[in-house]
Image (cartoon, helix red, strand yellow):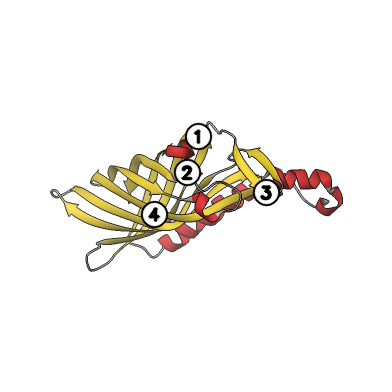
Amino acid sequence: MYVMKKILIMLFTGSLAIAQNCDQIIGEAGMRVPFGNIADKIGPSTEVGIWSRSRVYGFWDMFDIGASIYFPSDRQEFNYSTPDSLYRVKAKGVSGMAGFRLAKDYALGNKMEVQWLSTFGYAFFMYDDKNSRNMHKTNPRDFEDSTNDWYIKTLSTFHIGQGIYVGYAHLGVQINYNYTPYGQFSKYVPKNFGSHSLSFGLVYRT
């Protein structure tokens, strides 16, 4: 789909462009596991990320800029309301975040290390907007130039994450807690839509 491809290209080409002047490239692959209310909308999902890292001076040892996306699986319907209607919609396309990350390094030897990760950024959750589809059916002349991609919308919020990385040389594993309160910034879904997930997986650094 055009919208999904556009988001993927924007996130990853942006990260690669920044990476040209960085000290290190970081690639991640693993799973995003939702819990709490958001686990009623999606299941454990494949997640990938790319980050460009630069060394800084001060308390934090490294500064990362990048993005991660996941491909929602086991998608379940959830309530999406307008002033006069209630719809049942599902996640669509990809979801994820883009932002920056601070890393504090704790060396355990020549090549073994542990890092404390703090992530901040913008998070998005894509869904199929049945309200727009219904408007199209009701007033087709107003939507003559629309395609199916026009109906893919996003919930947006901030992303805060905390995690731990353990690695040896260029390879490691990490686990992160993600807080993304989508319901706090949308008038269409309930405040308790869901905010919590864990990301874990393999990490490769150049």
Q: Which comes before the other along the chain, label 4 or label 2?
A: 4
Q: For marks 3 and 2, give the CA distance.
A: 19 Å
Instruction: Label 4: state its secondary structure.
Output: strand
x, y percent for residue 89:
63, 39
Label 1 close to label 2 by CB (< 8 Å):
yes
Disc 1: CA contacts within 10 A as few (<14), some (14-19) or many (>=20): some
Residue marked by disc 3: 82
Residue marked by disc 4: 160
Give the farthest residue toward the top: 74
The amino acid type, in three-letter code, at marker 3 is Thr
Q: For marks 1 and 2, give the CA distance.
A: 9 Å
Q: For marks 1 and 3, give the CA distance.
A: 21 Å
Q: Which comes before the other along the chain, label 4 or label 3?
A: 3
x, y percent for residue 136:
79, 47
Residue marked by disc 1: 40
Q: For marks 4 and 2, give the CA distance.
A: 14 Å
The amino acid type, in three-letter code, at marker 1 is Asp
Q: Residue at x 84, y 49 (%)?
A: 139
Mark nearer the viewer, 1 or 3:
3
Q: Is residue 99 something that shows in the picture?
A: no
x, y percent for residue 174:
30, 43
Q: Which comes before the other along the chain, label 1 or label 2?
A: 1
Q: Is residue 97 something that shows in the picture?
A: yes
Q: Which quadrant of the view contains residue 203?
A: top left
Q: Is residue 153 left or right of residue 55?
A: right
Disc 3: CA contacts within 10 A as few (<14), some (14-19) or many (>=20): few
Instruction: Label 1: state its secondary structure.
Output: helix
Mark nearer the viewer, 4 or 1:
1
Q: For marks 4 and 1, give the CA distance.
A: 21 Å
Mark nearer the viewer, 4 or 2:
2
The amino acid type, in three-letter code, at marker 4 is Ile
Residue marked by disc 2: 194
